[in-house]
Amino acid sequence: MRRAVLLSLTAVLACFGTGCGKKSPLDPKNPVSLTVWHYYNGSQQAAFDALTEEFNDTVGREKGIYVQGYSQGSVSDLETAVRDAIAGKVGAEEMPDIFSSYADTAYEVEQAGALANLSDYLDEKELERYVDSYIEEGRIASDGSLRIFPTAKSTEIMMLNKTDWEPFAAATGASLDDLKTIEGVAATARSYYEWTDSLTPDVPEDGMAFYGRDAVANYFIIGMQQLGVELFRVENGELTLNVPKEELRRLWENYYVPMVKGYFGAYGSFRSDDVKTGDLLAYTGSTSSAMYFPDQVELEEGSHAIDYVVMTAPVFQDGKNYAVQQGAGMVVSKSDEAHEYAAVEFLKWFTQAENNLQFGCVSGYLPVLKEANSKEMLDQVSSERGLTVAPKTYDCLTAMFSEMEGITLYTNKSFENGSAARKVLEYHLSDQAQEDRAKVVEALKQGKSLEEASSAYVTDEAFEKWYASFCEALEAAVNKQS
């Protein structure tokens, strides 16, 4: 009886220490080497490298794990390298043990049978520590098991050039509260265009754009969700497209129309670039973009320093308070038990609150453990580790921590051709808006008023034509043959 009790206790302790009752297959005398492919660059890469070095010198040395990270450049470069490795293309490198991946790409690799089942190495108690929606996003296998390990997440915020906002607000009565809704942003942008136009009465129709947004695909996915429509509904692996005309008309009117009329704008690679050049006052972008918000506006006639405001991203009027959940996780290549086990051990260490927040302090990403998403924990970690957190990143993170309980984070489930469908959302409307805006600008140069120049592009007929083209392009994307 005593022997049976001792054996049971030993089994419980083994499960507690390793997860799912798996005995460690590692041997510290014969370390397992792991390669990690990611797309981090600059300060983000430096932060990741510092953490992997710390792991190698501590837990890794103790358990027999050595991790080496390699930046593949951009996200698209990383995705290409992974696809080439899976296909065994000439000159391609071997698959890494771990690589950063968004859900759509991970889904493709999973369909090829190349991802490890992470549920084999994590028990329910461990999973419960992570933000629920982050874990749910990673359950892309047909049986619902985990394939994507959440390592760093982001959502969207709105950032505003406070310095140049203030004279506009003083002159027009505009309020930051107006920017809480998407319709309010559009109305404010029109007011800003008209106010800046009035500053030069001898030059007609030279008003300036107020607002822009990165990731137009997010505008579609989250905007529709706020209006009560799941654009991509996936059940039992089957996709249903939901493209109701009424809701899409609201999206069209609050993005395309202000773009065509010059109230919104998109000029550089990112909207933070447009704030720097003085072409925009505000934008919606990823929390990780906060570090790129400029400290000054640079104009031909000189530059001036600016202050900033961090706000939650605007929501459609009377819409549900959804916000995008984004950011790549890490996936583990299917290999042998020792390498898979070691990979999960590293990822568990990397996502411990103090380590994840250290990375987030530099990258602007949100930590993935529930306990780590607080200002108090951020302050504690930065104090204990002597970290210097850039004010914009700090304000962005703490603003999101304070709002997390009132926001529902959302990302659509993965499906075949998901990447192609997202490209339609990203470019179909925005490209047309840019093209039609250029025609409006030409008409303005010929002496037409803004209303005259833009009238042909903002009619019911114009929307109907776009709507039919959009639905056709989206259907073609999701039904594309591999």
Image (spheres, rainbow, N blue to C red):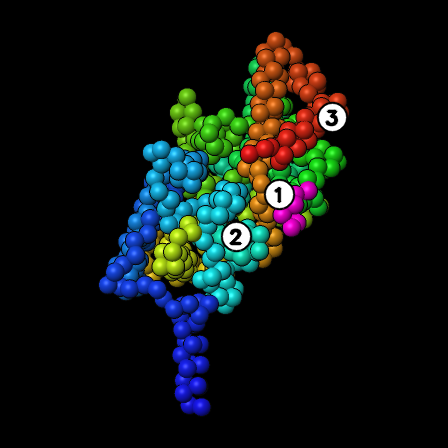
Query: Which quadrant holds residue 377?
Result: bottom left
Residue 34's x, y, as percent? 33, 52
For discs 3 and 2, the disc positioned in front in the rendered view: 2
Secondary element at tag 1 = helix
Classified by dominant secondary structure, the portion drawn in magenta counts as strand
Residue 167's x, y, as percent? 54, 33
Secondary element at tag 2 = loop
Q: Give the CA distance from mark 1 to mark 3.
A: 22 Å
Residue at x-position 43% and y-position 38%: 87
Q: Which residues are magenta?
A: 235-240
Q: Are the residues flagged by discs 2 and 1 in contact, CB closer than 8 Å?
A: no
Q: Are the residues flagged by discs 1 and 3 in contact, CB closer than 8 Å?
A: no
Q: Which mark is residue 199?
A: none
For discs 2 and 1, the disc positioned in front in the rendered view: 2
| Within-10-Å neighbours for mark 2: few <14, some 14–19, many 20+ | many
* Residue tagged 3: 464
User: Along the polypeptide, which appears first: circle 3 or circle 2?
Assistant: 2
Looking at the figure, which quarter contains the C terminus?
top right
Residue 233's x, y, as percent? 66, 45
Residue at x-position 65% and y-position 43%: 239
Q: Residue 353 versus residue 452: which sits nearer the camera?
A: 353
Q: Amino acid at mark 3?
A: Glu
Q: Amino acid at mark 2?
A: Gly
* Residue tagged 2: 138
- Residue that protrudes farthest toward the bottom in the picture: 1
Q: Which mark is residue 222?
A: 1
Q: Give the CA distance from mark 2 to mark 1.
A: 19 Å
Q: Is residue 99 visible?
A: yes
Q: Is residue 126 above or below residue 229?
A: below
Magenta stretch containing residue 52, yes or no? no
Q: Give the CA distance from mark 3 to mark 2.
A: 37 Å
